Amino acid sequence: MRVLVFNWRCWLNPAMGGAEVFTREVARRWVRSGHEVTLFASAFPCCKHEEVLDGVRVVRAGGRFSVYWRAKEYYRKRFSGEGFDVVVDEVNTRPFFASGFVRNGERVVCLVHQLAREYWFYEVPFPLSYLGYYCLENRWLRGCAGLPVVTVSESTRRDLVGLGFDDVRVVPVGLSFEPSEAVGEKEGFPVVVYAGRLRRAKRVDHAVRAFGVVRAKLPDAEFWVLGDGSFEKSLRGLAGEGVRFFGGLSDGERRALVRRAWVLVNPSVREGWGLNVVEANALGVPCVAYDVAGLRDSVKDGETGLLADAGDIDGFAERVLAVLGDEGLRMRLSRNALEYSRRFSWDKTAEEFMKVLEEVVSAK
Protein backbone atom coordinates (compact mmCIF):
# COMPACT_ATOMS: atom_id res chain seq x y z
CA MET A 1 0.00 0.00 0.00
CA ARG A 2 1.10 3.57 -0.72
CA VAL A 3 -0.47 5.93 1.80
CA LEU A 4 -0.58 9.75 1.75
CA VAL A 5 -1.58 11.46 5.02
CA PHE A 6 -2.64 15.10 5.25
CA ASN A 7 -2.37 16.50 8.79
CA TRP A 8 -2.03 20.10 9.97
CA ARG A 9 1.07 19.23 12.05
CA CYS A 10 3.79 16.62 12.24
CA TRP A 11 5.11 15.15 15.47
CA LEU A 12 8.18 17.40 15.53
CA ASN A 13 6.05 20.54 15.56
CA PRO A 14 6.38 22.31 18.95
CA ALA A 15 2.57 22.51 19.09
CA MET A 16 2.07 18.79 18.46
CA GLY A 17 -0.53 16.93 20.49
CA GLY A 18 -2.20 13.57 20.83
CA ALA A 19 -3.32 13.51 17.19
CA GLU A 20 0.30 13.75 16.07
CA VAL A 21 1.34 10.97 18.47
CA PHE A 22 -1.34 8.78 16.89
CA THR A 23 -0.12 9.61 13.38
CA ARG A 24 3.52 8.94 14.24
CA GLU A 25 2.87 5.61 15.92
CA VAL A 26 0.67 4.13 13.20
CA ALA A 27 2.71 5.51 10.27
CA ARG A 28 6.05 4.19 11.51
CA ARG A 29 4.50 0.75 12.03
CA TRP A 30 2.95 0.74 8.56
CA VAL A 31 6.42 1.41 7.13
CA ARG A 32 7.90 -1.44 9.16
CA SER A 33 5.18 -3.70 7.71
CA GLY A 34 6.29 -2.85 4.17
CA HIS A 35 3.93 -0.01 3.25
CA GLU A 36 5.09 3.38 1.92
CA VAL A 37 3.86 6.43 3.85
CA THR A 38 4.11 10.14 3.04
CA LEU A 39 2.92 12.77 5.53
CA PHE A 40 2.17 16.31 4.37
CA ALA A 41 1.99 18.84 7.24
CA SER A 42 2.57 22.51 8.02
CA ALA A 43 6.03 23.98 8.43
CA PHE A 44 7.37 25.51 11.66
CA PRO A 45 10.42 27.65 12.48
CA CYS A 46 13.76 26.04 11.59
CA CYS A 47 12.15 22.87 10.27
CA LYS A 48 13.28 20.91 7.24
CA HIS A 49 10.83 21.13 4.38
CA GLU A 50 11.34 17.48 3.57
CA GLU A 51 12.92 14.62 5.52
CA VAL A 52 12.46 10.96 6.38
CA LEU A 53 11.50 10.13 9.97
CA ASP A 54 11.26 6.48 11.03
CA GLY A 55 10.90 5.57 7.37
CA VAL A 56 8.04 8.06 6.85
CA ARG A 57 8.59 10.75 4.22
CA VAL A 58 7.53 14.04 5.80
CA VAL A 59 6.86 17.03 3.52
CA ARG A 60 6.12 20.41 5.10
CA ALA A 61 4.69 23.62 3.65
CA GLY A 62 2.38 26.39 4.77
CA GLY A 63 1.36 27.45 8.25
CA ARG A 64 -1.48 26.68 10.62
CA PHE A 65 -4.11 27.96 8.18
CA SER A 66 -2.38 27.94 4.78
CA VAL A 67 -1.42 24.26 5.10
CA TYR A 68 -4.87 23.38 3.74
CA TRP A 69 -4.54 25.11 0.38
CA ARG A 70 -0.85 24.18 0.18
CA ALA A 71 -1.90 20.52 0.46
CA LYS A 72 -4.08 20.95 -2.61
CA GLU A 73 -1.21 22.66 -4.44
CA TYR A 74 1.30 19.94 -3.55
CA TYR A 75 -1.11 17.22 -4.58
CA ARG A 76 -1.61 18.83 -7.98
CA LYS A 77 2.11 19.42 -8.58
CA ARG A 78 3.67 16.33 -6.95
CA PHE A 79 1.54 13.75 -5.23
CA SER A 80 -1.01 13.11 -8.00
CA GLY A 81 1.65 11.36 -10.06
CA GLU A 82 3.10 9.18 -7.30
CA GLY A 83 0.57 6.36 -7.44
CA PHE A 84 -0.90 6.49 -3.94
CA ASP A 85 -3.58 3.93 -3.12
CA VAL A 86 -5.26 5.87 -0.33
CA VAL A 87 -5.26 9.38 1.13
CA VAL A 88 -5.93 9.92 4.84
CA ASP A 89 -7.57 13.30 5.48
CA GLU A 90 -6.77 13.89 9.16
CA VAL A 91 -9.35 16.27 10.60
CA ASN A 92 -8.35 18.67 13.37
CA THR A 93 -11.60 20.67 13.46
CA ARG A 94 -11.21 21.49 9.75
CA PRO A 95 -10.79 18.80 7.07
CA PHE A 96 -8.47 19.17 4.06
CA PHE A 97 -11.45 18.25 1.84
CA ALA A 98 -9.12 15.90 0.01
CA SER A 99 -12.01 14.20 -1.77
CA GLY A 100 -12.56 17.46 -3.64
CA PHE A 101 -9.13 17.53 -5.26
CA VAL A 102 -7.78 13.97 -5.18
CA ARG A 103 -8.42 12.89 -8.75
CA ASN A 104 -6.11 10.02 -9.66
CA GLY A 105 -8.06 7.02 -8.42
CA GLU A 106 -6.94 7.17 -4.78
CA ARG A 107 -9.54 6.42 -2.13
CA VAL A 108 -10.00 8.96 0.67
CA VAL A 109 -10.50 8.05 4.34
CA CYS A 110 -11.09 10.64 7.07
CA LEU A 111 -9.41 10.37 10.46
CA VAL A 112 -11.34 12.33 13.11
CA HIS A 113 -9.89 12.29 16.63
CA GLN A 114 -12.58 14.47 18.19
CA LEU A 115 -15.05 17.21 17.49
CA ALA A 116 -14.11 20.68 18.69
CA ARG A 117 -17.57 21.65 19.97
CA GLU A 118 -17.00 23.45 23.32
CA TYR A 119 -13.35 24.06 22.42
CA TRP A 120 -14.51 26.96 20.27
CA PHE A 121 -15.53 28.95 23.36
CA TYR A 122 -12.29 28.24 25.19
CA GLU A 123 -9.72 28.64 22.44
CA VAL A 124 -11.23 31.04 19.88
CA PRO A 125 -12.23 34.69 20.51
CA PHE A 126 -15.76 36.02 20.07
CA PRO A 127 -17.46 36.25 17.56
CA LEU A 128 -15.50 33.57 15.67
CA SER A 129 -16.20 31.15 18.52
CA TYR A 130 -19.97 31.40 17.91
CA LEU A 131 -19.52 31.15 14.17
CA GLY A 132 -17.35 28.06 14.59
CA TYR A 133 -19.61 26.33 17.10
CA TYR A 134 -22.94 27.00 15.41
CA CYS A 135 -21.93 26.97 11.76
CA LEU A 136 -18.39 26.22 10.60
CA GLU A 137 -17.60 22.89 12.26
CA ASN A 138 -20.85 21.19 11.27
CA ARG A 139 -20.58 22.52 7.72
CA TRP A 140 -16.96 21.40 7.41
CA LEU A 141 -17.69 17.92 8.71
CA ARG A 142 -20.80 17.46 6.59
CA GLY A 143 -18.60 18.21 3.60
CA CYS A 144 -16.95 14.83 4.30
CA ALA A 145 -20.19 12.88 4.77
CA GLY A 146 -20.24 9.80 2.60
CA LEU A 147 -16.56 9.07 3.16
CA PRO A 148 -15.39 6.22 5.40
CA VAL A 149 -14.18 7.58 8.74
CA VAL A 150 -11.86 6.27 11.44
CA THR A 151 -12.11 7.67 14.95
CA VAL A 152 -10.68 6.74 18.35
CA SER A 153 -13.69 6.58 20.68
CA GLU A 154 -17.32 5.58 20.81
CA SER A 155 -18.23 9.12 21.93
CA THR A 156 -16.84 10.63 18.74
CA ARG A 157 -18.44 7.89 16.64
CA ARG A 158 -21.83 8.83 18.05
CA ASP A 159 -21.18 12.52 17.38
CA LEU A 160 -20.34 11.76 13.75
CA VAL A 161 -23.32 9.47 13.24
CA GLY A 162 -25.46 12.32 14.53
CA LEU A 163 -24.06 14.50 11.75
CA GLY A 164 -25.01 11.98 9.07
CA PHE A 165 -21.90 9.80 8.74
CA ASP A 166 -22.82 6.17 8.19
CA ASP A 167 -19.42 4.44 7.90
CA VAL A 168 -17.50 5.21 11.09
CA ARG A 169 -14.98 2.69 12.48
CA VAL A 170 -13.50 2.97 15.98
CA VAL A 171 -9.77 2.19 16.21
CA PRO A 172 -8.57 2.64 19.83
CA VAL A 173 -5.31 4.38 20.67
CA GLY A 174 -2.24 2.50 21.83
CA LEU A 175 0.57 2.78 24.35
CA SER A 176 4.13 3.86 23.66
CA PHE A 177 5.61 1.81 26.53
CA GLU A 178 5.01 -1.44 28.36
CA PRO A 179 2.70 -1.21 31.37
CA SER A 180 4.28 -1.67 34.80
CA GLU A 181 4.34 -5.17 36.24
CA ALA A 182 2.59 -3.98 39.39
CA VAL A 183 1.42 -0.80 41.10
CA GLY A 184 4.63 0.88 42.19
CA GLU A 185 5.74 2.74 45.29
CA LYS A 186 3.94 6.04 45.84
CA GLU A 187 5.01 9.32 47.34
CA GLY A 188 4.79 9.36 51.15
CA PHE A 189 2.08 12.05 51.09
CA PRO A 190 -1.02 12.45 48.87
CA VAL A 191 -0.09 13.60 45.36
CA VAL A 192 -2.56 14.67 42.67
CA VAL A 193 -1.04 15.01 39.20
CA TYR A 194 -2.03 16.61 35.91
CA ALA A 195 -0.01 15.68 32.80
CA GLY A 196 -0.72 17.48 29.53
CA ARG A 197 -0.84 20.77 27.67
CA LEU A 198 -1.79 23.87 29.65
CA ARG A 199 -4.58 25.31 27.53
CA ARG A 200 -7.88 26.88 28.56
CA ALA A 201 -9.94 24.03 27.11
CA LYS A 202 -8.08 21.54 29.31
CA ARG A 203 -9.62 23.39 32.31
CA VAL A 204 -6.64 22.82 34.57
CA ASP A 205 -7.96 25.84 36.49
CA HIS A 206 -10.83 23.58 37.62
CA ALA A 207 -8.28 21.10 38.95
CA VAL A 208 -6.41 23.89 40.75
CA ARG A 209 -9.64 25.11 42.38
CA ALA A 210 -10.65 21.57 43.30
CA PHE A 211 -7.23 21.03 44.84
CA GLY A 212 -7.90 24.01 47.12
CA VAL A 213 -10.77 21.98 48.59
CA VAL A 214 -8.55 18.91 48.84
CA ARG A 215 -5.74 20.84 50.54
CA ALA A 216 -8.15 22.16 53.18
CA LYS A 217 -8.92 18.54 54.15
CA LEU A 218 -5.43 17.10 53.56
CA PRO A 219 -2.89 19.83 54.42
CA ASP A 220 0.11 17.73 53.35
CA ALA A 221 -1.27 17.02 49.85
CA GLU A 222 0.45 18.36 46.74
CA PHE A 223 -0.73 18.98 43.19
CA TRP A 224 1.93 18.40 40.52
CA VAL A 225 1.30 20.13 37.19
CA LEU A 226 3.35 18.51 34.42
CA GLY A 227 3.37 20.32 31.09
CA ASP A 228 3.51 23.79 29.61
CA GLY A 229 1.36 25.98 27.41
CA SER A 230 -0.28 29.36 26.94
CA PHE A 231 -2.46 29.04 30.07
CA GLU A 232 0.44 28.51 32.48
CA LYS A 233 0.75 32.14 33.59
CA SER A 234 -2.94 32.32 34.54
CA LEU A 235 -2.70 29.03 36.42
CA ARG A 236 0.30 30.19 38.41
CA GLY A 237 -1.67 33.26 39.48
CA LEU A 238 -4.53 31.06 40.63
CA ALA A 239 -2.47 28.39 42.39
CA GLY A 240 -2.23 28.27 46.17
CA GLU A 241 -0.10 26.30 48.61
CA GLY A 242 0.91 22.81 47.54
CA VAL A 243 0.70 23.40 43.78
CA ARG A 244 3.98 22.73 41.95
CA PHE A 245 4.67 23.45 38.28
CA PHE A 246 7.26 21.23 36.58
CA GLY A 247 7.06 22.63 33.04
CA GLY A 248 7.77 20.58 29.94
CA LEU A 249 9.47 17.25 30.65
CA SER A 250 10.89 14.35 28.70
CA ASP A 251 8.72 11.24 28.45
CA GLY A 252 10.90 9.47 31.02
CA GLU A 253 10.82 12.35 33.51
CA ARG A 254 7.06 12.72 33.16
CA ARG A 255 6.38 9.01 33.66
CA ALA A 256 8.67 8.84 36.70
CA LEU A 257 6.63 11.58 38.40
CA VAL A 258 3.22 10.23 37.35
CA ARG A 259 4.17 6.78 38.65
CA ARG A 260 4.62 8.19 42.18
CA ALA A 261 1.32 10.08 42.17
CA TRP A 262 -1.78 8.80 43.93
CA VAL A 263 -4.28 9.98 41.31
CA LEU A 264 -4.31 11.68 37.90
CA VAL A 265 -6.86 14.41 37.15
CA ASN A 266 -8.29 15.40 33.78
CA PRO A 267 -10.99 18.11 33.84
CA SER A 268 -10.90 18.80 30.08
CA VAL A 269 -13.96 20.15 28.31
CA ARG A 270 -13.76 17.10 25.98
CA GLU A 271 -11.16 14.76 24.51
CA GLY A 272 -10.86 12.50 21.53
CA TRP A 273 -9.92 9.75 23.94
CA GLY A 274 -7.60 10.84 26.74
CA LEU A 275 -4.24 9.27 25.99
CA ASN A 276 -2.75 10.62 29.22
CA VAL A 277 -5.40 8.66 31.15
CA VAL A 278 -4.37 5.26 29.79
CA GLU A 279 -0.68 6.16 30.04
CA ALA A 280 -1.22 6.91 33.75
CA ASN A 281 -3.18 3.67 34.09
CA ALA A 282 -0.17 1.81 32.66
CA LEU A 283 1.87 3.27 35.52
CA GLY A 284 -0.65 2.10 38.10
CA VAL A 285 -2.41 5.45 38.56
CA PRO A 286 -6.22 5.84 38.41
CA CYS A 287 -7.91 8.98 37.08
CA VAL A 288 -10.59 11.39 38.22
CA ALA A 289 -12.13 13.18 35.24
CA TYR A 290 -15.22 14.98 34.07
CA ASP A 291 -17.94 12.90 32.45
CA VAL A 292 -17.43 14.29 28.93
CA ALA A 293 -16.85 12.92 25.45
CA GLY A 294 -13.66 10.89 25.23
CA LEU A 295 -12.99 10.79 28.96
CA ARG A 296 -16.10 8.73 29.61
CA ASP A 297 -14.55 6.25 27.18
CA SER A 298 -11.03 6.14 28.63
CA VAL A 299 -12.11 6.24 32.31
CA LYS A 300 -14.24 3.32 33.45
CA ASP A 301 -16.23 4.94 36.25
CA GLY A 302 -15.87 3.04 39.50
CA GLU A 303 -13.39 0.60 37.94
CA THR A 304 -10.30 2.48 36.71
CA GLY A 305 -11.20 5.89 38.10
CA LEU A 306 -14.09 8.16 38.98
CA LEU A 307 -16.15 10.58 36.88
CA ALA A 308 -17.71 13.84 38.06
CA ASP A 309 -20.42 15.87 36.36
CA ALA A 310 -18.91 18.21 33.79
CA GLY A 311 -18.04 21.57 35.34
CA ASP A 312 -18.87 20.52 38.92
CA ILE A 313 -15.68 21.56 40.71
CA ASP A 314 -16.97 20.57 44.16
CA GLY A 315 -18.02 17.17 42.86
CA PHE A 316 -14.62 16.80 41.22
CA ALA A 317 -12.89 17.61 44.53
CA GLU A 318 -15.10 15.09 46.36
CA ARG A 319 -14.01 12.30 44.03
CA VAL A 320 -10.35 13.21 44.35
CA LEU A 321 -10.75 13.16 48.14
CA ALA A 322 -12.49 9.78 47.92
CA VAL A 323 -9.49 8.29 46.12
CA LEU A 324 -6.91 9.93 48.36
CA GLY A 325 -8.73 9.14 51.59
CA ASP A 326 -9.68 5.52 51.02
CA GLU A 327 -6.66 3.27 50.54
CA GLY A 328 -8.79 0.26 49.69
CA LEU A 329 -10.61 2.14 46.94
CA ARG A 330 -7.38 3.65 45.65
CA MET A 331 -5.59 0.31 45.42
CA ARG A 332 -8.58 -1.35 43.73
CA LEU A 333 -8.80 1.42 41.14
CA SER A 334 -5.02 1.37 40.64
CA ARG A 335 -4.86 -2.38 40.04
CA ASN A 336 -7.87 -2.27 37.71
CA ALA A 337 -6.38 0.67 35.81
CA LEU A 338 -3.09 -1.15 35.33
CA GLU A 339 -4.82 -4.27 34.08
CA TYR A 340 -7.06 -2.21 31.76
CA SER A 341 -4.03 -0.55 30.17
CA ARG A 342 -2.74 -3.91 28.97
CA ARG A 343 -5.49 -3.94 26.32
CA PHE A 344 -3.85 -1.12 24.39
CA SER A 345 -1.03 -1.42 21.88
CA TRP A 346 0.10 0.78 19.00
CA ASP A 347 0.85 -2.41 17.08
CA LYS A 348 -2.81 -3.36 17.37
CA THR A 349 -3.92 0.18 16.50
CA ALA A 350 -1.77 0.30 13.36
CA GLU A 351 -2.95 -3.15 12.28
CA GLU A 352 -6.65 -2.35 12.73
CA PHE A 353 -6.32 0.99 10.94
CA MET A 354 -4.49 -0.62 8.00
CA LYS A 355 -7.24 -3.24 7.72
CA VAL A 356 -9.74 -0.39 7.27
CA LEU A 357 -7.58 1.19 4.55
CA GLU A 358 -7.16 -2.14 2.74
CA GLU A 359 -10.92 -2.78 2.85
CA VAL A 360 -11.63 0.67 1.43
CA VAL A 361 -9.12 0.27 -1.39
CA SER A 362 -10.29 -3.24 -2.26
CA ALA A 363 -13.89 -1.99 -2.49
CA LYS A 364 -13.11 0.28 -5.49
Image (cartoon, rainbow, N blue to C red):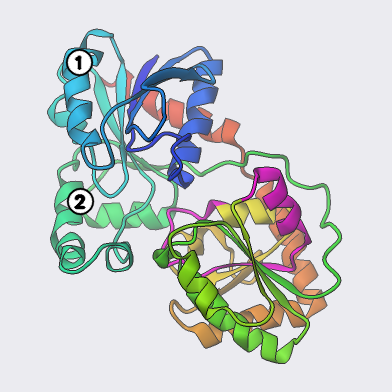
Q: Residue 140 at x, y = what percent?
A: 17, 48
> How busy is the neighbourhood of tag 1: few (under 14 within 10 Å), some, or many (20 plus)?
few
Give the side of residue 177 with respect to residue 306, left or right.
right
Q: As displayed, is residue 21 above or below residue 222?
A: above
Give the side of residue 151 with respect to residue 181, left or right.
left
**Which residue is depicted at the point 54% across and 85% down?**
315
Q: Residue 254 at x, y = what percent?
A: 68, 52
Question: Dividing the picture into quarters, in which one does residue 201 lie?
Answer: bottom left
Q: As displayed, is residue 110 above or below residue 104?
A: below
Give the side of residue 266 with respect to residue 58, left or right.
right
Q: Magenta segment, which residues?
A: 249-275
Front one among 35 and 116: 116
Residue matched to label 1: 105
Q: Quadrant location of the N terminus?
A: top left
Q: Is residue 46 visible?
A: yes
Q: Secondary structure at mark 2?
A: loop
Q: As displayed, is residue 342 above or below residue 267?
A: above
Cα–Cα span, label 2 and label 1? 25 Å
Magenta segment includes 258: yes
Q: Is residue 291 visible?
A: no
Q: Secondary structure at mark 1?
A: loop
Residue matched to label 2: 164
> How busy is the neighbourhood of tag 2: few (under 14 within 10 Å), some, or many (20 plus)?
few
**Which residue is depicted at the point 50% across and 39% down?**
21
